[in-house]
Image (tube, rainbow, N blue to C red):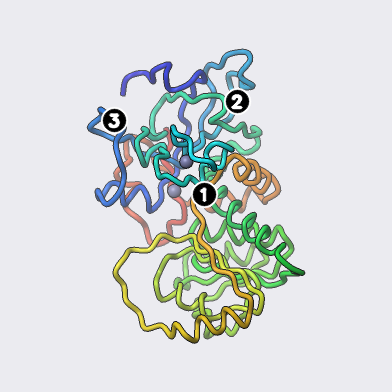
Amino acid sequence: MPEPSAEEGAVLVDGVAVGLCGTDVEIVAAQYGQAPPGSDLLVLGHENLGRVAQAPPDSGFAAGDLVVGFVRRPDPVPCPPCGVGEWDMCRNGQYTEHGIKGLHGFARERWRAAPDALVKLEPELASVGVLLEPTTIVAKAWEQVERIGRRAFWQPRVAVVTGAGPVGLLAALLGVQRGMEVHVYDRVTDGPKPQLVADLGATYHHESLPDSKVLADVIIECTGVPSVVVDVLTHSATDSITCLTGVSTVGAVLPLDIGGLNRNAVLANDVVFGTVNANRRHYEAGIAALAAADKGWLERLITRRVPLAEYASGFQRGPHDVKVVLEI
Ligand SMILES: [Zn+2]
Ligand SMILES: [Zn+2]
């Protein structure tokens, strides 16, 4: 890649690391993703960490600062949510996303960003700062759950997280940080996930949510697996709030008693909502959550660090991988 052009922003950043996730795998498989206009390739990498190489004196950044670039940028119109900085709620779909939609990603030795498209991290987060972007996803999920909870008296006690991948484990972390009794569900019985959950002080389940008989006040669904989605839609406490974060493949048809689902949702004041992406507020909440977490625990989420030259092996998922990171 050529040196990033000045048009990309006033702050020049040395790439440190990018985290890989299912979105990258889908882009590699050409199921998703869009190159920048006029380019026949898309640089991957949305979960990012960098170090400022050069910044204008009035930018709020200085050489050496650890930074994370916002993945999504507001649409050019802009729509009303983008106009107030809530690009995660963009209404017209014309937003762009680094490494995903219309903008090169962060898996580059050097990239540039505008000062208002970056957040600064304390040096203590150097080894785990690449986890910030997935943390912003769950910081938004929890923020939205709490905003919805304020519709009436609400004293949530039990939280369920489905899926013990990076997003699920980080969702569980934020639930524990809120003082909740957290239950995490995943299929695997070995590898690092059960112990990571136990070390949070949460409970790991490899049986299904219905089999466990747990009824949660808050559910964060992180798998997108249709049968698991049915489980969370049909097994929750009264006045519960269920947040869907997993993007499913389309086309699975499962039998579902819609009348029963509707009846239970109405009679129990249930809320089900979806969430995607994150804005500055959620990056700041994510930084606070990482800073308050046990750093050794966060480091254990990164089960493999792959040098850039060996990038291809980063896309081969090992059975015990949680988060794989490309080191730039
Ligand atoms: Zn990702
Ligand atoms: Zn917009």
Q: What residue type is labelled 2?
A: Asp
Label 1 sits on a secondary structure element that is helix
In the shown orientation, is residue 250 left or right of residue 203? left
Q: Where is residue 289 in the image (x, y as percent from the top left)?
A: 66, 49
Callout 2: few (<14), some (14-19), or many (20+) C-alpha neighbours within 10 Å? some
- Of 232 and 209, the residue lying toward us: 232
Assign the N terminus to one quadrant of the image.
top left
- Of 3 and 266, the residue lying toward us: 266
- The numbered mark, 3 or 2, whose residue comes first in the sequence reads 3
Q: Position of residue 14 (x, y in %)?
A: 47, 25
Q: How far apart are marks 3 and 2 (CA)?
A: 31 Å
Residue at 41 percent across and 36 percent down: it is 98
Relative to 304, residue 253 above or below: below
Callout 1: few (<14), some (14-19), or many (20+) C-alpha neighbours within 10 Å? many
The residue under label 3 is 37
The residue under label 2 is 65
Assign the C terminus to one quadrant of the image.
top left
Mark 1 and ligand 1: say if the CB distance to the nearest ligand atom is below 8 Å.
yes
Q: Distance between the residues labelled 1 and 2?
A: 21 Å
- The numbered mark, 3 or 1, whose residue comes first in the sequence reads 3
Residue at 51 percent across and 69 percent down: it is 162
Label 3 sits on a secondary structure element that is loop
Relative to 328, residue 21 above or below: below
The residue under label 1 is 134
Q: Distance between the residues labelled 3 and 1?
A: 27 Å
Disc number lying in front (1 or 2) = 1
